[in-house]
Amino acid sequence: MITHARTHARTHTHTSKYLLLPWGWHFGLGPILVIFAVYMALLSVSRIGLMLWQWDVIPESGAITVLLYGLRFDFASICGLLAPVLLLLSICSLLGALPRVLVWIVRFYLAAAGAFLIMNEAATPGFILEYGVRPNNIYVKYLIYPTEVIKTLWGGHKLELLLSLALTAAAFVACWYLSGWAFKRLSQQALTVADHSKDSSSSGSSSANSNGSDAATKEAAAPTLRLRWLNRGLILAVVQLLLVLTIVPLGIRSTLGHRPLNPSMAAFCPSPLVNSLPVNSSYSAAYALVHLNDTQVSSDNIYKLLPENEVLAAAQEFSTRTPAKTWPSCPLRQHIAPYQPGKLYNVVVVLEESMGADFVESLGGLPLTPELEKLKEHGWWFNNLYAAGHRSIRGIEAVTAGFPPSPLESIVKLPAPSATSSYATLAAIFKQKGYATTFVYGGESHFDNMRSYFLANGMDSVIEQKDYTNPQFVASWGVSDEDLFNRAHELFTQQYAAGQKFFAVIFSSSFHDPFDIPPGKVTIDDPNVESSPRYLAVKYADYALGQYMQKALSAEYGKDTVFLVIADHESKVRGQGAIPVNKFHIPGVIIAPNIEPREDNRIVSQIDVPVTLLSLAGFSGAVPLVGQNLLLPDAKERAVMQYNDVFALYDQKGVISLTPQRPAEYFAYHNKQLTQTTADSDQRRLQLAAGMENVGPLFYEKDYASINCVTWDEQPESASAATAASPTAQP
């Protein structure tokens, strides 16, 4: 009879649609806890591998800090990832049954979760090589553009891509089988309980046949014992559910303080890379995704939030300026006098993708941009020009709108602060005087929201990849730079012939990973420089630039045009210090009528460019721009830059680095090297740096950089030069 009952129990357990267990048993949580521990171990192993790889930049005794902080972020990450499963199985434990279909769903979810963790960890080394930190908001934002990303990865990173896919697939399969093993043990335990129940019942019946009086006694006592056991089991199931509802949210929040866990809490040293190591890449990416559309900064992602009056005072002090009349909606304006009064000039901005100082020999880089360096013979060359950020959208907002960098997203990506006006961009300002304004790009202009930004802020038209007829060469990121410049040259020639003044931004793309360029155009002859696709691409970008500038300067429109050639940012911005200042060093040259060739050794910023161009173009009026006119003899030497969540002010005294949740750090900067120093006794520098970090968020929130804050002086173009004041400095 016992054998028959056991066989019946096994048949029932395997054919039922449910796994049945007594109340209070850790129903399903056993397998989840096993998976939880495995996930924790995988993330720790990955972190240790990254630490060994980057051991040279980890400060003394910093390894333990990285590991301990890492465990905290890993626990929070996995609590968040497994929260739905933990809650589901706790409810099933309370009900005493788990539908078998849910077992399959849970197993798939666990496998996908493991693959997600490994996918992000596998992507981390490549991201560190490119951006100097773990995957962050940049990683998430690029996912919006899958076509460009896939082309880039397949074109230049096949091995890394295939290896990451293989690791991700392997993780999915491994987690699938691991969860299967864990749930198999659960099923076996369910079977054992069922068998024990049947055996007890059969044993009781057999005993009753031989001992009638004892059976009657046991039968009377059975309901009482069963009820006591069920009450205890129900209590345990309720306790289990309450523990899950308590521990999991606390694990995700990871603190009882008023601010939940966030990446800035891991900052403990000057290095952004080291500070990013404790935060596993999945947590970092998820945090960035949640805050992707934030239009305000909080105390978690800025050194210090300051009141408006202190921010405006810092903005005033930052630049040499001629004050202009202000009003409440436009509290910061400066007057700009034309360099050559009486005439308005065309303006062409050539924004070179990633062509930083690393590739300019005279700036300490490789000899890969000889055509760019030839432009020194024609214009005003800057030896100490610094980019505002390490992404194109930072360069675009700085060069076209003079907008300072900050922890806030670039205004290129943010929604407009006003539905009735635009920013005071160069395009919007020149458009007020009837200029034709054009953004010329070789790729798809929707990338990084460039098309929307330019059209909403003064550009009449956007030329992009679809607008080219029979281009010579099409790469992953669009037509070649030669096609780009040929199209621009054709447009400017037509506009000039028609008597139309114009402002244009030409944005190159040939020097962009995966570095597709027309074959046979350039070679690298220097034996000390390898002929890698990357170096060939920058050499080609320089070649195309040289071909265009030669044509433009000899063309009819050349004599009435102000040209600016400038990089948007340096390539591969990463470093060991708090902020790699040397990786923000970029070339820049202005070629304009009556500008004598010279080299400028002052420390200057990208955000100074718009004000300077306005003066050179003949603008006379007031603008709400933060930068300064570099034509002024007393222009201040300083630059600001944003590197992930680190903000820096660089001036003649050195560098002040501001990181959220950390004290300010001071550095001397010589020969492209940072050396940490003691705090500056002059607190005004720190106040200036902190204030400038707040300028971007304040101006965005209050729309203080609106085109409505721009006014032109009433002066006809043909007016005599003697009737207007102009800067006295000869650049």
Image (tube, rainbow, N blue to C red):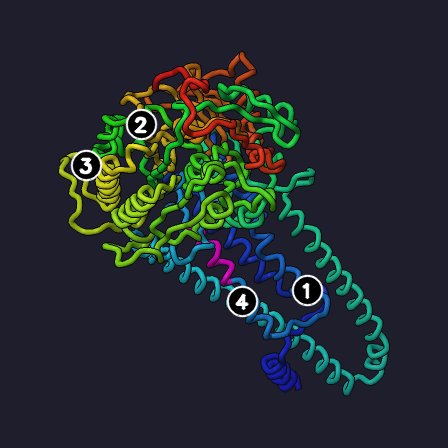
- Which amino acid lies under the numbered mark 2 shown in the image of this protein? Pro
Task: Measure how far apart labels 1 and 3 are at the Cα level.
Answer: 67 Å
Residue 159 visible in rendering: no
Which is nearer the N-term, disc 2 or disc 4? Answer: 4
Where does label 2 land, which residue? 593
**592 or 545, nearer to the observer:** 592
Instruction: Assign a secondary structure to mark 3.
Output: loop
Are dots 4 and 3 in contact, CB under 8 Å? no
> Mark 1 sits on what residue?
25
Which of 131 and 433 lies nearest the eye of the viewer?
433
Residue at the spot x=44%, y=37% of the render?
400
Report the predominant secondary structure element of the magenta stretch: helix
Q: Callout 4: few (<14), some (14-19), or many (20+) C-alpha neighbours within 10 Å?
A: many
Precedes in sequence: disc 4 or disc 1: 1
Name the image quarter holding the C terminus: top left
Amino acid type, label 1: Trp
Label 2: state its secondary structure. loop
Name which residue type carries label 4: Arg
Residue extent of the magenta highlight? 111-122
Looking at this view, name the residue that lies furthest to the top.
Answer: 681
Earlier residue among tags 4 and 3: 4
The CA distance from mark 2 to mark 1 is 85 Å
Q: Quadrant of the N terminus?
A: bottom right
Which callout, 2 or 1, points to the residue nearer the camera? Answer: 2
Q: Position of residue 289 (x, y in %)?
A: 54, 50
